Structures are given as C-alpha cells and as structure tokens.
Image (cartoon, grey):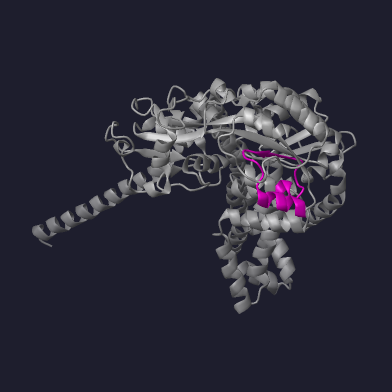
C-alpha cells in the first residue's frame, strides 16, 4: 500500500512538472508590495475581476514596500505597491535585471499622531515637540510629558509606533527626526497597527502614530494631534480637506504603484492599470485614504498610455510634499 | 504493637495521604491552566465569530467589505496544501523511520543521522521557509505554488513523522520479528507484512500531530509566497478553457487560513476582526475534524491487529 502511494507521488511530481507550462494560459495580473497601499489595490482588484466577469485573475500580496520591490525587480510581479518612491538601490537592481517601470502616484496617506482621548493637554503639538519626544537622544531621558512642554502635567509618557520594516516608520522618522530610521528605541513597536491602537486607547499618557485609516476607524477610542510645522504657526488636524489643500504638513505623503513596462503591453495588465486610474478616486475614498484630484488620475492615464518610464523622485524620499508639489513634479 | 505506635503509624499514613491529595489538586490545577486558557480563547473567538459563520462565509472570496468577505480561497488552499503535505511527508517519513529501525547498521553514521533528525524537529519554521524559497521556488522552479507550500510543510513535519514511526516500530515485540525471520522471511517481508501494519496506528498519531502543526503555520508559507488577496480557485482537473490538466492545480497561486486571519486582524475596520474570529473557529474545526478522522482510523486499524 505504501509503495503504490509513493509511486503516485513520484508520478504526480513528474506529470506536474511537465504540465507547468500550461498554467500560464489564463490571464493573470500579479501585484505585491506595501501593506499601506494594499486596501486600495485590493478594492481595485476585487471590482476589476467582477467587471471582467472573472476572465482575468488578479493576486495581491503584502511583502512590504521593500519586499515588493525585490520581487518586482526580479520580474516576478507585474505591479508593485509602494508607500514611498523607489530608492536608488532598487532602481539599480531593476536596471541590472533589465526591468523598466512606470511610476504612478495613486493617493495620499496622512500619518496621524494619536493620543488618549483623556489627554487634554497635548491636542496641539509642533514638529519640534514631536522631535523632542522621538529623537534618538530622548531615549531613556525623556519620560514625562512635562519635559516636552513645561505647561503639561508630570505624567509618564508611553510611546507606540510601527516596527522598523514599515514604510510608515521610515517616513515618520525622516519627517520628524530629519533622518530615516533614526529614532529612540524604547517604545512599543508592532507591525500590527491594531496593537498600537489598543496601547494608546488604554494609556492616558500614551502617544503613537500610524496611517489615517486606523484613526478613522477608532475615533471613539483615540484623539488625533493637530500638528504645527513651527511654534507660532497654526496647528492643523489631519483630515481629507487638510491633506488636499496641503496644510497638513509634514506628515502627509503620496503612495504609488509601479508597473513593469514590459508587462504593461499585456492586455490584462494594461486594462488593470487603466481600471485603477479610472476608479481610483472613488475606491480610495471608500477605504479611507485621501484621493488625488481627478486631473492627477487623468494625467496618470496619459502618462501610462505614453509609457513614461522611470521615477520623478531621483531615488529619494521627499518630506512634506503637498499634492500641488506632487502634480508639479509629475508634470515635468 | 501498642496503641501508641499504631496511633503514630496512622498519623503518618494520614499525612502521606494529605500529600497525595495536595499533589492531585496541583496536577488538576496545572491541567486546568492549559485547558481553561484554550476554552477561554475558543469561547471568545466563538462569541465574536459565530454571527459571521454561514454558507456565504464559506463560499465567498475575500472582499474589502467585511460583510461580503469569505474564506473560500483560504480553506480550499489550506485543504490542498495539506493534501500535498500528507502525500509527501507520510511515505518519506515512514520509509526513513523503517530504514533507521529495521535496516540501518548500528554505526556512527546512523548515529549522526539520528541526532540530526531529532534536532531538525526543533528548527524554527521560518528556516524551512527560507530553505524552500531557495530550493523549491528558485532552484527547482516550482514557483510560488500549492506544490511548493505543500512540500515546505512536508519538510517541516518530516522529523515528527520519522520520530513517531520509530517509536511505533519499537513498541512491536521482538518475538514478532524473530518468529517471521525463523520462518525464512526477508527483511522486506517482515517490514511490509508485519512491522508497518502493526505500527500504523502509532504512525498515524505522529502524522496527525505534524499535520495539526502544519495547518496553523504562517511564516514559512508567507516566505514561499502565499498571497493575501486571491479571488479565484486553483483549476480543477479537466475544467475551464483551455482545459486544465490533471495536476495544474499544484502550480496555482494560493492563500491559506492563517494568512487570511492574520490579514483580517490587522485591518482597521472592526468588522474584519469578527471575520478573523469566524475564520479561526473554522480553522479549529478543521483541525478537530482531522484529529477525529485519525482517531477513527486508528480504532479501525487496531481492531484488525491480532497477535
């Protein structure tokens, strides 16, 4: 009995291998990358498949922005979700593998600094105050709210933030501390944003940061901090309007998809990207992200039709870019 | 024996009995700690998830709307991956176990193999994932497929199956072997007619312990490239256009239950947490079904053994 089973497995492996060439017959669009962009791409993939009556298949993974680019630059995926522009190193990797890409900004995300709703003293903060809390030098030294601002009570401060692999972490540290990944180490880190939500919701002295969508869903348990770029300037609360008019600074950031230029010639990939741009605005709103103005999606469609290759960011992350700025860069 | 000695003896017995009783209580407490933790977790999951469990939940694909989202692609993926795992791990594991017990000469080389097999059981699962990524995905070119995931998990549970096989074989009385050899049987005849059939109940237990571990694994499966959003099923043999081959499903992209749960627990909308709880409930149910099947099979097999 065991022998026949063994033979069956061997036969399975052999016939399976010879059949592997046939599997690609069905149209398939492979997407991987950032978990921040995932909800939008998932929504687009879901509706796109329905609109095509399931004749085209779309898969979406969440390997993170960096992990997604690794697969993208090996030619394993057709589209890569990214919560930051492609880096110089990644551009080189793609080039070495002969992969050209089309960069398309698809939405904005507002990193939201949150506190416990019982915290009534720190509803407004400046970037300098946030830096005082999060900079590497604060480690072990800054432990009370009073040390940040002498008008605030002497309560212990408890910090919550995403882990070091996250694009959110990278952007926040660059925008606040001036250098990507430079941060104090003594905070509760979790890749699961819901853990951060729980932490701040239970702790009156808690402070944390994550994407806007998580704040919107937990408005009853958390309060958002209004951020002022400098002392004396007005503090701005994160919202759809303040991101669109560019006043919520410097924590608003664009998010992207990157399309493999060669794969873009396949009809299913082309149709998927076009569907993405045509329905991006409404779907982005539905999953609680900030959409770009309609003309940006129209511009993307045009850019994609012309196969405009390369990045407009020169391999660097730009902090404090408003939608206006982004449009200007893209129009270049 | 005078009255006083009798008294002190009784006191001694009573105090020993007290210790007996105390240890019994301690044992029950230790047991309850584990059982109650599981019951509490399971009850919590059931309360949160039961409202979501219906036919639609089992027959729908994932969706951005929590109320429409289901686990069809996840449970089908889990079942198929487990199938591949069982087909690969059982014959290999049993063959290895039989070889080590019945064939292998007792020398230093066999000792090294034995030590390695035992140690392999303690290797973190992510290591198997990395190994599989290099070996199956890239070197063998099997891609990020059900076959790759199944083989990865098969590697993961292979040590468990081997160790269980050896334990089961060792439990067979030596006289059975001696009797068979005395009648002129070859080693292969002894193994196929006596050793494997008699030890199959024990082997089955090992296989199920391994499978129960494998079905809940996330890390190695993510490493070899399981997906999060996938709204189609692997091709069933001889269906679709162009018609799918008998084994095309082995090469299809997939997701599994633990990954679907993990994705839902990290979503901002709270409704997804209920979905995750419901998926967890189904996953526990799947594991229990697997265990139930094993217990039934074991019962059937034991009934047939007559020494």
**Residue under the point 80% across and 51% down:** A98
Q: Residue furthest bottom?
A: B107
Q: Is residue A199 visible?
A: no
Q: Residue furthest right?
A: B242
Q: Position of residue A222 (x, y in %)?
A: 43, 26
Q: Nearer the viewer, residue B303 or A199?
A: A199
Viewport quadrant of the N terminus of chain B: bottom left
Q: Is residue B39 visible?
A: yes
- Is A29 inside the magenta-drawn segment? no
B5 sits to left or right of A207: left
Q: Nearer the viewer, residue B199 or A172?
A: A172
Q: Which residues are magenta?
A: A71-96
The tally of labels here is: 0
Q: Position of residue A179 (x, y in %)?
A: 51, 47
Viewport quadrant of the C terminus of chain B: bottom right
**Residue under the point 65% across and 47% down:** A87
Q: Nearer the viewer, residue B285 or A264?
A: A264
Above or below, B78 against B201 in this view is above
Q: Position of residue A313 (x, y in %)?
A: 67, 41
Res A267 quadrant in image: top right
B144 sits to left or right of B8: right
B24 sits to left or right of A232: left
**Residue under the point 39% across and 49% down:** A137
Above or below, B207 against A260 in this view is below
Above or below, A276 against B190 in this view is above
Q: Position of residue A282 (x, y in %)?
A: 67, 20
- Is A92 inside the magenta-drawn segment? yes
Above or below, A110 against A94 in this view is above
Res B160 quadrant in image: bottom right
């Amino acid at each position: 009995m065991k022998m026949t089973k063994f033979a069956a497995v061997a036969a399975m492996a052999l016939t399976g291998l010879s059949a592997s060439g046939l599997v690609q017959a069905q149209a398939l669009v492979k997407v991987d990358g950032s978990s921040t962009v995932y909800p939008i791409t998932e929504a687009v993939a879901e509706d796109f498949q329905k609109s095509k009556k399931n004749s085209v298949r779309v898969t979406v993974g969440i390997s993170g922005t960096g992990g997604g680019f690794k697969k993208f630059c090996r030619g394993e995926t057709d589209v890569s979700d990214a919560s930051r522009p492609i880096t110089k190193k990644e551009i080189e990797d793609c080039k070495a593998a002969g992969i050209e890409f089309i960069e398309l900004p698809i939405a904005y995300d507002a990193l939201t600094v949150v506190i416990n709703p019982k915290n009534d003293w720190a509803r407004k903060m400046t970037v300098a105050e946030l830096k005082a809390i999060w900079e590497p030098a604060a480690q072990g030294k800054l432990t009370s709210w009073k040390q940040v601002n002498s008008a605030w009570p002497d309560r212990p401060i408890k910090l919550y933030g995403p882990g070091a692999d996250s694009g959110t972490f990278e952007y926040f540290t660059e925008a606040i501390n001036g250098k990507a990944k430079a941060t104090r180490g003594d905070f509760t880190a979790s890749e699961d944003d819901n853990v951060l939500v729980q932490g701040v919701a239970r702790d009156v002295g808690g402070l944390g940061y994550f994407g806007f969508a998580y704040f919107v869903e937990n408005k009853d348990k958390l309060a958002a901090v209004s951020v002022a770029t400098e002392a004396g300037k007005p503090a701005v609360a994160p919202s759809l309007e303040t991101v669109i008019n560019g006043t919520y600074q410097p924590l608003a950031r664009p998010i992207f998809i990157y399309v493999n230029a060669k794969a873009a010639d396949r009809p299913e990939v082309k149709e998927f990207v076009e569907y993405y741009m045509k329905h991006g605005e409404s779907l982005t709103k539905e999953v609680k992200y900030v959409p770009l103005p309609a003309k940006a999606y129209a511009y993307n469609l045009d850019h994609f039709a012309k196969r405009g290759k390369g990045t407009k960011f020169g391999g660097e992350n730009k902090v404090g870019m408003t939608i206006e700025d982004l449009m200007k860069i893209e129009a270049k | 024996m005078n009255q006083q000695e009798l008294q002190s003896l009784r006191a001694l017995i009573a105090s020993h009995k007290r210790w007996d009783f105390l240890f019994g209580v301690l044992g029950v407490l230790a047991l309850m700690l584990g059982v109650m933790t599981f019951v509490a977790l399971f009850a919590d999951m059931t309360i949160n998830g039961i409202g979501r469990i219906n036919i639609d939940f089992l027959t729908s694909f994932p969706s951005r709307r929590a109320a429409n989202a289901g686990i069809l692609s996840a449970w089908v993926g889990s079942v198929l991956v487990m199938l591949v795992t069982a087909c690969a791990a059982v014959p290999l594991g049993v063959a290895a176990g039989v070889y080590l017990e019945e064939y292998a000469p007792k020398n230093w080389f066999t000792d090294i193999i034995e030590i390695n097999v035992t140690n392999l059981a303690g290797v973190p699962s992510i290591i198997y994932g990395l190994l599989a990524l290099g070996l199956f995905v890239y070197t063998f070119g099997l891609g990020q497929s059900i076959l790759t995931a199944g083989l990865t998990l098969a590697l993961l549970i292979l040590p468990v199956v081997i160790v269980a096989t050896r334990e089961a074989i060792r439990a067979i009385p030596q006289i059975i072997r001696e009797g068979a050899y005395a009648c002129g049987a070859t080693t292969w005849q002894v193994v196929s007619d006596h050793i494997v059939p008699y030890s199959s109940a024990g082997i089955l237990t090992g296989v199920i312990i391994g499978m129960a571990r494998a079905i809940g694994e996330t890390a190695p499966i993510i490493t070899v490239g399981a997906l999060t959003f996938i709204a189609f099923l692997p091709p069933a043999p001889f269906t679709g256009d162009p018609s799918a081959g008998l084994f095309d499903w082995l090469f299809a992209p997939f997701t599994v239950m633990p990954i679907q749960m993990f994705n839902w627990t990290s979503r901002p909308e709270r409704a997804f947490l209920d979905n995750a709880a419901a998926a967890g409930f189904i996953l526990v149910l799947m594991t229990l079904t697997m265990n139930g099947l094993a217990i039934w099979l074991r019962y059937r097999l034991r009934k047939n053994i007559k020494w």
